[in-house]
Image (cartoon, grey):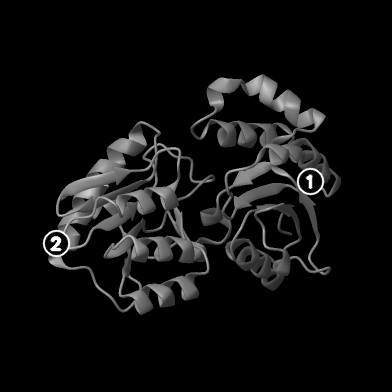
């Protein structure tokens, strides 16, 4: 018998894809849907779930224990929380006090959350262990292909993103005609793309490359894009988007690829080691 799965669900369709997978496989599951992130349309009465704020992690731990959850997956996009979202319950306040401020600003909180869940006797899994078909495949996914200059820029962006990732700073880089227009910091991918639109040059358009940090835990915060990323890339005059093959996710994949085709942008799953040659 398969182990009961707890799903911590953020935004986008990916959590629902996992729910459908569990239903098809006959796997028992329970969902903690994050308010302000998870999409209400997916959580009908027949889906076993509970809504909670980000600051109610302690409440979530308790609910998973009551539901006898054994494995946990964190999946879906999480927007930057507001003050109300972060007001902690008592258990979460104790959690933040224990990990300290040094965990803020990188993947520290997520890593600490994994440890806390596993201290409760649950095993945190990556989506690649539960439903690997959700990960982006290698190669061009839509109708549009990158140009020769785009490929040179992809190579340069991968080099920069890899070093950026080693420093645990960000996952995304934008390069145009060999020049680095911007690297991702605390602002997130969307804001990176927006501000780089102000720096674009004439001629061959730039590319956005988003890859997993070399030391990153595959169970948390995998590189993710979606239709909002495509919209931003189009408005900023980019040629296309690359995502780490086998290590990244596309929210609403079919719709996102169709939108890229409409705008004349490419989406490509890349293997960084292939560009290191």
* Mark number, residue 264: none
Q: Nearer the viewer, residue 254 or 88?
A: 88
> Could you tell me residue 114's position as x and y percent?
62, 37
The quarter of the displayed image where residue 130 is located: bottom right
Give the residue drawn at x 51%, y 61%: 132
**Can residue 49 be seen here?**
yes
Which of discs 2 and 1 lies nearer the camera? The answer is 2
**Residue 91 at x, y = what percent?**
78, 29
Few, some or many residues within 10 Å of mark 2 (<14, 14–19, 20+): some
Category of crowding for the residue at label 1, using alpha-carbon neighbours closer than 10 angstroms: few (below 14), some (14–19), many (at least 20): many
Q: Are marks 2 and 1 in contact (CB under 8 Å)?
A: no
Closer to the camera, 35 or 66? 35
Name the side, left or right, on which 49 lies relative to 141.
Answer: right
Give the SS element for disc 2: helix
- Name the side, left or right, on which 8 lies relative to 208: right
Q: Is residue 35 left or right of residue 204?
A: right
How far from the left and from the top, in percent, is residue 149?
Answer: 14, 61
Image coordinates of residue 164 in percent, x first then y, are 32, 37
Q: Residue under label 2, please give it.
A: 149
Tell me the quadrant of the picture where the N terminus can be found.
bottom right
> Regarding mark 1 in the picture, which secondary structure is present there?
helix
Residue at numbered disc 1: 64
**Which quarter of the figure has residue 99?**
top right
> Which residue lies most toward the right here?
66
Residue at x 29%, y 52% (from the top left corner): 198
Q: Return the residue nearer the eye: 123 or 193.
A: 193
Mark 2–mark 1 distance (CA, rounded to whole Å): 50 Å
Q: Tell me if I can see residue 138 in this picture.
A: no
Residue in view at x 35 percent, y 66 percent: 234
């Amino acid at each position: 018998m398969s182990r009961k799965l707890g799903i911590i669900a953020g935004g986008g369709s990916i959590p629902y894809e996992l729910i459908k997978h569990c239903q098809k496989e006959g796997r028992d599951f329970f969902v903690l849907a994050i308010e302000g992130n998870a999409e209400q349309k997916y959580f009908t009465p027949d889906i076993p779930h509970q809504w909670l704020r980000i600051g109610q992690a302690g409440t979530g731990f308790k609910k998973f224990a009551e539901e006898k959850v054994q494995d946990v997956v964190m999946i879906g996009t999480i927007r930057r929380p507001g003050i109300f979202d972060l007001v902690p319950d008592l258990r979460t306040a104790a959690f933040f006090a224990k990990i300290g401020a040094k965990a803020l600003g990188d993947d520290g909180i997520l890593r600490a959350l994994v440890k806390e869940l596993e201290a409760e006797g649950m095993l945190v899994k990556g989506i690649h262990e539960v439903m690997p078909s959700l990960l982006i495949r290698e190669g061009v996914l839509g109708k549009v292909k990158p140009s020769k200059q785009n490929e040179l820029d992809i190579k340069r962006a991968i080099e920069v993103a890899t070093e950026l990732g080693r420093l645990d700073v960000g996952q995304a880089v934008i390069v145009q005609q060999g020049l680095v227009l911007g690297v991702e910091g605390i602002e997130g991918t969307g804001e990176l793309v927006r501000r780089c639109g102000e720096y674009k040059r004439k001629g061959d358009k730039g590319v956005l490359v988003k890859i997993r940090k070399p030391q990153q835990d595959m169970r948390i915060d995998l590189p993710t894009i979606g239709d909002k990323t495509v919209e931003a890339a189009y408005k900023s005059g980019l040629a296309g988007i690359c995502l780490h093959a086998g290590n990244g996710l596309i929210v609403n994949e079919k719709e996102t690829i169709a939108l890229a085709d409409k705008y004349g942008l490419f989406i490509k799953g890349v293997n960084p080691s292939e560009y290191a040659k």
